[in-house]
């Protein structure tokens, strides 16, 4: 079986704001997973903001920015925990 090519992450997530004022959107849980193996001051700021906001859950992975490829055994339990909550 051939592996599928890896697609790039969608950049629009950083350029298009989430819909504001929609109750269903406001109720969605908020989680930030900081991949510390990818040094980036911007992502560090997002993690710091999430750590100070009680509405956010913050997780850390020591792998790269593509944890589903480089750290799946760390990422999977986090995602399962989030899906169960």
Image (tube, rainbow, N blue to C red):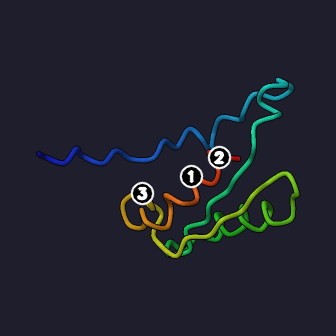
Left or right: residue 28 versus residue 70 is right
For label 3, the crowd category at 10 Å Cα-Cα, with few meaning under 14, some 14 to 19 and many 20 or more, is few
Q: Give the CA distance from mark 1 to mark 2.
A: 6 Å
Secondary structure of the residue carrying tag 2 is helix
For label 1, the crowd category at 10 Å Cα-Cα, with few meaning under 14, some 14 to 19 and many 20 or more, is few
Q: Position of residue 43 (x, y in %)?
A: 64, 64
Q: Is residue 57 above or below residue 3?
A: below
Tell which tag, 3 or 2, sits nearer the viewer: 2
Q: Nearer the viewer, residue 17 or 67?
A: 67
Q: Which residue is mark 2?
A: 84
Q: Is residue 83 above or below residue 52?
A: above
Q: Give the CA distance from mark 1 to mark 3.
A: 13 Å
Residue at 77% over, 68% down: 48
Left or right: residue 81 versus residue 53 is left
**Res 46 quadrant in image:** bottom right
Secondary structure of the residue carrying tag 1 is helix
- First in sequence, mark 1 or 3: give its number: 3
Q: Which residue is mark 1?
A: 80
Q: Is residue 66 above or below residue 12?
A: below
Disc 1, disc 2: CB below 8 Å?
yes
Q: Position of residue 63 (x, y in %)?
A: 47, 72
Q: Is residue 15 above or below residue 74?
A: above
Disc 1, disc 3: CB below 8 Å?
no
Residue at 88% over, 57% down: 54
User: Furthest residue to the front?
Assistant: 84
Q: If the image is split into quadrants, where does the N terminus sit?
A: top left
Q: Which residue is mark 3?
A: 68
Secondary structure of the residue carrying tag 3 is helix
């Amino acid at each position: 079986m051939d592996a599928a090519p890896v697609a790039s992450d969608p950049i629009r997530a950083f350029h298009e704001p989430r819909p504001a004022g929609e109750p269903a959107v406001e109720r969605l849980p908020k989680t930030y997973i900081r991949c510390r193996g990818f040094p980036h001051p911007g992502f560090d700021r997002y993690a710091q903001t999430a750590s100070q906001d009680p509405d956010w859950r913050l997780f850390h992975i020591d792998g790269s920015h593509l944890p589903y490829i480089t750290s799946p055994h760390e990422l999977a339990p986090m995602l399962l925990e989030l899906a169960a909550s």
